[in-house]
Image (cartoon, rainbow, N blue to C red):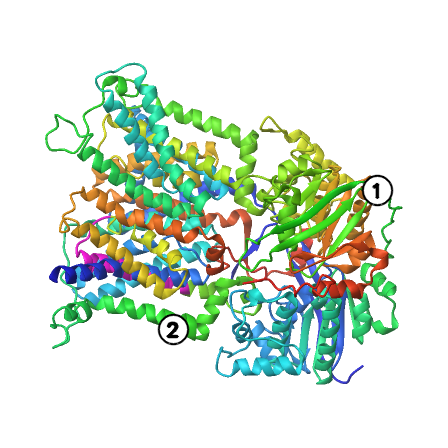
Amino acid sequence: MAGQPILEIDSISKAFPGVLANDRVSFSVGAGEIHALLGENGAGKSTLVKIIYGVNHADSGSMRFLGRPYRPERPSEARSTGVGMVFQHFSLFDALTVAENVALGLEDGQPGTGLDQRIVEVARSYGLPLDPSRRIGTLSVGERQRVEIVRCLLQRPRLIIMDEPTSVLTPQEAGMLFATLRRIREEGCSILYISHKLEEIRALCERATVLRGGRVVASTDPRKETAKSLAEMMIGSALKAPARHETLTGASRLELNGLTLPSSHPFGVDLADISLEVRAGEIVGLAGVAGNGQDELMEALIGERRVAVPRAIVVDGVPIGHQGPSARRARGMAFVPEERLGHAAVPDMALTDNTILSAAERMRLIRGGLIDRTAAARFAGEIVSAFGVKTAGIEHQARSLSGGNLQKFVVGREVLQDPGVLIAAQPTWGVDAGAAAAIHQSLIDLAAKGAAILVISQDLDELMTICDRIAVIAGGRVSPARPTAKVSVEEIGLAMGGQSGAGVASGAGHA
Amino acid sequence: MDLVVNILIGIVIAATPLVFAAIGELVVEKAGVLNLGVEGMMIMGAVAGFATRIETGSPWLALVAAMAAGAIMAALFGLLTLTLLSNQVASGLALTLFGLGLAALLGQAYSGMSAPAFPRLSIPGLSTLPVIGPLLFGHDLLVYLSVALVAGVVWFLGRTRAGLILRAVGENHDAAHQLGYPVVLIRYLALMFGGAAAGLGGAYLSLVQSPIWVEKMTAGRGWIALALVVFAAWRPWRALAGAYLFGGITILQLHSQAFGLKIEAQYMNMLPYLATILVLVVISSDRRRLQSNAPASLGKPFYAAS
Amino acid sequence: MLRLERRKEASRSMLYATPFLAVLLTMAAGIVLFALIGKDPLRAISIIFFQPLTSVYGVTELLVKATPLVLIAVGLSLGFRAGIWNIGAEGQYTMGALAGGAVALAFYDQPGLWLLPLMCVAGAAGGAAWAAIPAFLKTRFNANEILVSLMLTYVAGLILSVMVFGPLRDPEGLSFPESRLFHDSARLPVLISGTRAHVGILVALVAVLLTAFVLARHRFGLVIRVLGAAPAAARFAGFSETATVWTCLLVSGALSGLAGLFEASGTLGQLVPALPVGYGFTAIIVAFLGRLHPVGILAAGLLLGLTYIGGEGAQIAMSLPSAVTSVFQGMLLFFLLAMDVLVNYRIRLGSRPAAAIAAEAE
């Protein structure tokens, strides 16, 4: 343990409507310490760090910073006291330049006036190359994180809070980040490191405070724990790994043949010549850092944007690139988009109505133009009971469900339609471990029944656990899929960074 | 020559209310708020300015009153959309409908009256020069104010920290909130600036362009100003240029007789509206470019969970 | 300090209660307004909101005013639910009246039973055609339908003016720029003799019932709800935005055009330049006040019809300015939008005790 604590947290509580996010949380971060704050999604980590950074305010409890009482009214106060923060959802502005973004994070910063020079200097000394004049929208996710970190460092903070910093990085980028963090620590700055990735916490941190259901359940030295023991503290019980079945791959069910599609968004990524095959009974994973064409690929696969060449997408031998979502569903496809609220489900509509969105064709919920609400309610009830969705009733709005429960509902809606081809993007993103395990098991079971499943995910652990083969998407191109057993995390990581055998350039979009 | 000078002066006079209204709305939209109530704020500015001019005789008090009327209307819109989080489109429509009604009510006592001429720039020696004098040095003072306002907005948005913060709020209000900027307050201020500018634009109509009070005298100019902001791709100087282009189209109708066009006045009167539609079509058809120019948070409601 | 707290779900009771609250607040604000301009507030309120209901003539006139409002608002509400903002109903109304009226005048010398139906078709087609312009420009060129439809309203007014000054002007008329009176067979049949209550009222009722059915049972009702609430989810479901934009604009254009024709053929019996009196804009208020639901719109249409008749009454009896009506209508929409917050948020006083909220969650 390093000497006098930088930050002491004493009995902090914070409630939101319906949840007690933090319940009398106490711990302290030592000087020059990398301190892990560990917990599942929904354990209260984000709320706590927002209180420390002055975005939220505690209902009760107190904090001390360098021995003095500390209660920041707003982030600027936290920054001037010496607390910096790197957000998980970056607080960056796409249309503004790197320098402007940095200026916005400083108390008196203004682009020009020597700021560019300072950015370049700090960036170089920490091994984080940056061009101050580029627009954020044109940067890769890793580069954006650098902007956040540089912005933080320019304020000479005593404590940096990092919220899930590696969730958007390739393993190699994560390695570089760790080197930077150790550098920062050597200069006497403490780091509060929030994560649910156990291996990296064991590699990086000296202390770990474990949160569960808003409470501190353990405080430990993670280097002396195993990933398994940490996971049990985090979840509160031993976790059952999803049971795999013997994979019997059959006929090709989904084929992409040279799928090419320019993006429709100003900072989007063009899909370039993507070829991929998924066979019956198989789960294929598509790894990649966010913003490398996953959204565009999902659009093209769902049929939200049609492809001029029908043969670019083939399902069960039938070219469907030119068809819309309904026709594709009628062919046996089903989709789980990444965004639950607003894409996969309408937040303000009842669960019953939400089933109709994607199940109208296959479950015959609309006939002759008229909606069969009885059938829709029956199907919604079926989903809720089969997937253990916690809800007060199917007549309640989608937005009233917790993230994990809504995701179970969305996945259940697709899986229970018994599709021949299922495409799921980030199926367990932001979901608690129990729900994630249930979702994984349902995908595995569906494949065992002969469906072809494509899982698009940034979470390499997830893909390594459930997939038979893994391909990588970078810069809108997809590398050939390889059997999971025969690839290493490092190889996938290199491909995610764009250094695959195909010799693809880095994954940045274009302006 | 006189005809050309007259036409050019006419263009300036027709364009100036649009310059005020459009530059105000541009700042509002840069902050991420879509206020469709420009028409309602303009008409309130027009009636408040006119009434004050008649009652007090002072053109300057009239301008202050017009700005205040526009700003109060804008604050009302802010109350609805920023504080009470109601739909921005519906609230903008409400502002226009309410403004048109209230202005008609307040203006009833003044209909038929006319206001005295507005002070003009007069620089001995320069203003009396042929051609150049009336074109550059002989306008009413509001014309110069409108151009100065555009220059001021360019400087503010591009060169000041406050301008940077305003753009940041319009670009991504959640990130701005995370960094600790008071999103709602900044938007209120932007809205009230926009309201004051629209009020000035309205006052220009009732005090300078045709110094009488007539119900509904804004005749869609607030809506044209909204289209100009899109046309300008949210760039101030382009908004100014767009306003002068529209001024030119408007003035065409007045001088069509002089050009020997034998065509019903109504057809000429349609021109500004048709031109607005044409401009929208041309500028909007490149979806991707429009998207990259528009402030990313434009029209989205902001609710801070904490 | 007042704070807003987002509800987990929209409150249904508030959804229905807030329009009534808005009406009450509008009356309260009206009382203040009248007191300020030195008129007896209670008398004014009673003249505007209650007196028209005391005579058969008042009630039938109310129905005559409510008919175009309800017809237009029912059409607009479909688009508003989907986030398609046709605010140019006034122009579509004008073009419907013009198209239907032109048919009446063209066949002035060959009257027959077929004339009125033909006029109705022409009226609906005229309105729909005028709404087709923003639909085409939005779906093809991504042009904002709010601005396009509104600009076209000004253009429609000018076209009407050109026509009644020119080709459609009464050949025997002296100096007034207006058409001749329609032939009797081109007039809408009157329901109650001695009043102006015409069969258009029944058509409006049919439109209400039909729309209510579509919203409750038909796929289209779901499509517009999804498109309005979550456009990305609509794309995910495979609902075509283009088709929805076209449908919403054509339907609302046709209903507005029909309303215009009813006004020309039923209420006025001729084409005059002053035909557009703002029903197309007031209908926007009607649509919102009726919560975008046909039955609510029916009630809201009657209420706003009342403000027209009552406003006229107050003009005569208390020499109140005519603009009072539009001020009332504007205030009504303002208060309604302000009250809307109660549907999705709770208003809380001061900072909340954590325990109380945690307990409430159980």
Residue C272 is situated, as x and y percent measured from the top left of the image, at 21, 32
Looking at this view, name the residue that lies furthest to the right. A246
In the image: residue B107, left or right of residue B90: left
A465 versus A303 height, above or below: below
SS label for mark 1: helix
Circle 2 is placed at which residue position? B155
Q: Position of residue B34 (x, y in %)?
A: 43, 55
Q: Which residues are magenta?
A: B190-215
Name the quadrant containing residue C200: top left
Quadrant holding the N terminus of chain A = bottom right
Quadrant position of residue B1 = bottom left
User: Mark 2: which amino acid?
Assistant: Trp
Question: At x 47% / y 57%, what residue is drawn?
Answer: B289
Please, is residue C143 above or below residue C303 in the view? below
In the foreground, C234 or A402: C234
Q: CA distance from mark 2 to mark 1?
A: 64 Å
Q: Is residue A70 above or below residue C342?
A: below
